Image (tube, rainbow, N blue to C red):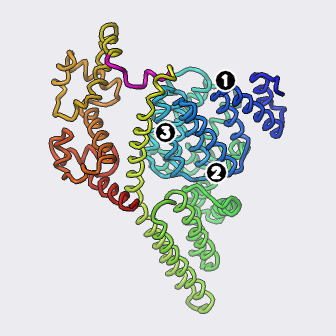
């Protein structure tokens, strides 16, 4: 085994005839060889292969920790991006969506620094999926639109599959937002794209998933006949793929079609499939919880208090899982108190069913309504409290990560591949001024001006054009093309990033008023500063300062 080359070991690992146990043996040999040769890339490849073969959560956690350690030891930004991508993926598999999002955003930043477009848009797609699963549809839409545009501009079957997958995900976002006209347009584009796939199997597979979205859209349009036909057409291939989540989402829509057309007994059969899935897996996607609303309503209509209570209890259990998955690190005590109230209400319901046969239906209805109201109240209150805190933590993480990256100057020397994404020296800028295009010269001078923090002073497009020896039309076009923003957005983002970073690391600044901060960082008024800060971070500067102070007090 020691004499095997990397190529020969990789062939053994990729061979479909090699058993999983044998693959692990060859992966270990590959890893030891790479470690002996001090080859960080091959070490990372071996650990990625190992991760893809295993399911044990504890082992997976150990593997990704090794990957992060190797990446930091290598001082290679691309390996850091890959490592944090895998940390995010493992967290996602464990349904720890908060951690998956934090590390996914970290990976995105490293891929961007490494100038690795393929890796960058792969992690963007994963982030879109995370935002979708956590019901943040506007953000999911932004990421899926970006990946669709990226893959659509590139040739090859893999890029085409990426384009179709992005359109499929955009379609699901459209369904969640009830944008039926938009979904129709997106699905037409996706179906047309499938015809360019290289194999019949790929075409049928991708079209099955698209038909699920199309069928759901027909349901929203109340075209129940087409909805049922299209969903059933998608079901067989999705079942063959052992995609249990999407299989049961199809059951949900088939049940809703049957319910809305007066076939409630048939509908209940579909909804019970969802309950069986939850009983078996002990988790569900958020969309599937709707099946329990129908089950509770059905047994309420039929005066079956026992089953109404049964599915009410299951809904409570399911909501508790959603709360833990999406908001595990915040308001734990709040949820304990609310769940205690729900359990007390449930117990009241049970006792009244046992002790008062005469009035059990009335008590059941009142208790069930109370439970549902408490669930909705608890969920809404937590959303209001956690959304702002979540945005605050993401902002802090983003600027903490930027500080961390800025402390790695040795990367500029050790890795020639990343010199394009590190700040250029003054002499390098001068060389480009002499020999580069007008756009290159202006971009380099903009970079130098950013480092000099020119944006902290009041400045107009005309002033900046003059400073860069160009005209406003040329400068506007360059900023739009390179920064993907207009001039005001570009300047405001620089200012907000600067003040956010300073507030995070300079506690004395937090003593200034909002008006004082606005003036110090180039804004004409407190109102324009508040608006720009909220657009960039999702929170107001006063809230950001308040949370920073609370966090510091908590550390003392």
Residue at the spot 26% in from the left edge and 25% down from the top edge: 449
Mark nearest the camera among 1 and 3 is 1
Q: Is residue 402 magenta?
A: no
The residue lying toward the viewer, choosing from 463 and 451, is 451
Expressed as whole percent of the image width and height from the top left, the position of residue 129 reads: 53, 44
Which mark is drawn over residue 285?
Answer: none
Q: Secondary structure at mark 1?
A: loop
Residue occupied by mark 1 = 198
Foreground label between 2 and 3: 2
Q: Earlier in the sequence, mark 1 or mark 3?
A: 3
| Residue 184 circle label | 3
| Circles 2 and 3: CB atoms closer than 8 Å | no
Which residue is at 35% across, 60% downward? Answer: 550
In magenta stretch: residue 419: yes
User: Is residue 380 depicted above or below 215 in this figure?
Assistant: below
Residue 315 sits above or below residue 480 on the image = below
* Left or right: residue 26 compared with residue 262: right
Q: Is 318 on the left or on the right of 469, as rendered? A: right
Disc 1 from disc 3: Cα separation: 25 Å
Residue 532 in percent (x, y) is at 26, 43
Look at the numbered discs 1 and 3 and tell me whether their residues touch, using CB distance below 8 Å. no
Within 10 angstroms of label 2, few (less than 14), some, or many (20 or more) residues? some
What residue span does the magenta drawing correspond to? 417-426
Residue 213, image x, y percentages? 56, 44
For label 3, the SS is: helix
Say which residue label 2 marks.
Answer: 245
């Amino acid at each position: 085994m020691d004499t095997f080359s990397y190529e020969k070991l990789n062939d053994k690992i990729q061979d479909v005839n090699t058993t999983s146990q044998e693959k692990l043996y060859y992966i270990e040999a590959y890893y030891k060889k790479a470690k002996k040769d001090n080859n960080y890339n091959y070490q990372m490849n071996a650990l990625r292969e190992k991760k893809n073969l295993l399911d044990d959560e504890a082992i997976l956690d150990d593997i990704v920790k090794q990957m992060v350690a190797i990446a930091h030891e290598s001082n290679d930004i691309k390996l850091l991006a890959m490592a944090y991508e895998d940390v995010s993926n493992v967290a996602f598999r464990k349904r720890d969506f908060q951690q998956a999002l934090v590390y996914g955003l970290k990976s995105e930043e490293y891929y961007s620094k490494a100038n690795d477009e393929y890796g960058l848009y792969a992690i963007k797609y994963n982030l879109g999926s995370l935002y979708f699963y956590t019901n943040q549809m506007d953000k999911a839409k932004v990421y899926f639109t970006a990946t669709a545009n990226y893959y659509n501009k590139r040739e090859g079957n893999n890029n085409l599959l990426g384009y179709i997958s992005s359109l499929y995900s955009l379609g699901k976002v459209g369904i969640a937002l009830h944008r039926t006209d938009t979904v129709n347009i997106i699905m037409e584009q996706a179906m047309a794209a499938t015809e360019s796939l290289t194999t019949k199997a790929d075409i049928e597979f991708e079209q099955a998933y698209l038909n699920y979205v199309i069928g759901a859209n027909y349901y929203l349009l109340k075209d129940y006949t087409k909805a049922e036909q299209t969903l059933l057409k998608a079901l067989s291939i999705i079942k063959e793929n052992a995609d249990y989540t999407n299989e049961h989402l199809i059951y949900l829509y088939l049940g809703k079609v049957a319910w809305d057309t007066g076939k409630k007994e048939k509908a209940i059969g579909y909804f019970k499939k969802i309950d069986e899935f939850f009983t078996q897996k002990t988790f569900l996607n958020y969309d599937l919880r709707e099946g329990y609303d129908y089950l509770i309503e059905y047994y309420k209509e039929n005066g079956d208090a026992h089953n109404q209570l049964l599915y009410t209890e299951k809904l409570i259990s399911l909501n508790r899982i959603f709360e833990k998955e999406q908001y595990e690190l915040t308001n734990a005590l709040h949820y304990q108190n609310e769940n205690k109230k729900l359990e007390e209400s449930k117990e009241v319901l049970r006792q009244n069913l046992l002790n008062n046969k005469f009035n059990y239906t009335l008590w059941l209805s009142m208790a069930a309504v109370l439970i549902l109201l408490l669930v909705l109240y608890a969920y809404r209150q937590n959303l209001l409290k956690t959304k702002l805190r979540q945005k605050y933590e993401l902002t802090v993480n983003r600027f903490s990560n930027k500080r961390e990256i800025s402390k790695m100057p040795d990367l500029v020397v050790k890795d020639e591949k990343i010199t394009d994404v590190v700040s250029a020296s003054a002499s390098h800028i001068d060389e480009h001024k002499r020999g580069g295009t007008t756009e290159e010269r202006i971009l380099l001078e903009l970079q130098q001006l950013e480092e000099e923090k020119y944006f902290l002073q009041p400045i107009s497009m005309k002033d900046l054009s003059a400073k860069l020896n160009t005209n406003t039309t040329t400068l506007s076009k360059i900023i739009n093309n390179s920064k993907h923003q207009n001039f005001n957005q570009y300047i405001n983002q620089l200012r907000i990033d600067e003040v956010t970073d300073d507030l995070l690391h300079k506690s004395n600044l937090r003593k200034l008023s909002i008006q004082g901060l606005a003036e110090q960082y180039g804004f004409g008024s407190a109102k324009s500063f508040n608006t720009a800060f909220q657009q960039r971070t999702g929170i107001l500067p006063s809230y950001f300062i308040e949370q920073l102070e609370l966090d510091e007090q908590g550390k003392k």
